[in-house]
Image: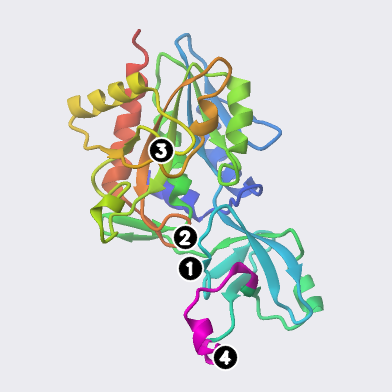
Amino acid sequence: MIYMLKEYAKAFGVSGCEGEIRGIIKNNVKEIGDVLIDRIGNLIVHKKGNGKKVMIAAHMDEVGFIVTNILNDGRIKFSPVGSIDSRILPSKRVTFYKNNIKGVIGAKPIHLQPIDERKNPFLLKDLFIDIGADSFEEVSKYVRIGDYATFESEYIELEEIIKCKALDDRAGCALITEAIKENYELDLYAAFTVQEEVGLRGAEVVSKVIMPEIAIVIEGTTCADIAKNERDFVTALGLGPAISIMDRTSAADINLVKRIVEIAKNNNIPFQYRKGNVGGNDAGIIHKTGKGCITATISVPTRYIHSPVSMISKKDFENTLKLLKLVLHSLEED
């Protein structure tokens, strides 16, 4: 399963350009159930059954960049795709999708910055991507307006920690791929959604097609356990899967949350509550489907989210899988 996560995390899949990661996931699930790719690009695996109609969902897309202009001197201007803190961007390496061209996010060197300017972080308008070309004509051989890029990031295992880009939400995609290998007395749908990072767009389409009775979203969520003040913690690495009560876009079904907590306790699976109500995920749109869908979110705590160096705990990853399987089996009951 760890190898699968490595394959998923390294794949390209910026919101709106998820073809590569979708193809990899499809290859891993094609023998598990009926596979459908809808018009917006969601990948759906259906394991037909006679029980409740249940959907488990994780988003395939990652944050990244899109080219907005190419200047005469060869600098490539860009906009972020999804929420990225511009303060982390200078000197980061990026990879373009079409041809694997590498680049570096550049800015004015410190030697040329007045003292006052050094005190402030760069704005996005001050940044550019440099691929080593010195003219519009040279850049245009490789890169065009509208091309996508993502962080270049090495997958590294640091004892009990995994570091890579896009663990939000390739961790969720790997967990669902593994979970659906098991058989359940459910009419089970696994949805690998697109464009979550730019507005939950794929989830809106897929939930209207499936119309699930119950949905469980598997997500990578903010982990701020390195904050100076414990009150700033949302989740902490190594304390187990995080169960959401509420976030910016949804409130979880309280009875389903109680069931998930009870299952974790009865099976000695460590868990934590996701503190605060910041952020959101596909549950924000799924719970509004049809006459309403019973929905909950189980997340893998992820440090340095939306950066090239996001980190998760192997134990959290493994315990999330255990919990997800047990919750699905519990839904077989009345």
At horizontal 39% and vertical 23% (from top left) the residue drawn is 253
Residue 159 figure quarter = bottom left
Decide if residue 113 is on the left or right side of residue 52: right
Disc 3 vs disc 2: Cβ atoms closer than 8 Å? no
Real-space Cα separation, disc 3 to disc 4, in angstroms: 48 Å
At horizontal 69% and vertical 69% (from top left) the residue drawn is 77
Q: Any mark on residue 307, and which?
A: 2
Q: Is residue 282 above or below residue 15?
A: above
Give neighbour class at mark 4: few <14, some 14-19, many 20+ (Cα, 10 Å). few
Which kind of residue does numbered mark 2 sit on?
Ser
Which kind of residue does numbered mark 3 sit on?
Leu
Which kind of residue does numbered mark 1 sit on?
Ile
The x and y percentages for residue 38 are: 67, 31
Name the secondary structure under disc 2. loop
Q: Any mark on residue 112, and which?
A: 4
Real-space Cα separation, disc 1 to disc 4, in angstroms: 20 Å
Closer to the chain start, of discs 3 and 4, is 4
Toward the bottom, the furthest residue is: 111
Circle nearer the viewer, 3 or 4: 4
Residue placed most toward the observer, 271 or 27: 271
The x and y percentages for residue 293 are: 49, 19
The residue identified by callout 3 is 175
Residue 95 figure quarter = bottom right
Circle nearer the viewer, 3 or 2: 2
The x and y percentages for residue 161 are: 30, 56
Real-space Cα separation, disc 2 to disc 4, in angstroms: 27 Å
Closer to the chain start, of discs 2 and 4, is 4
Residue placed most toward the observer, 30 or 172: 172
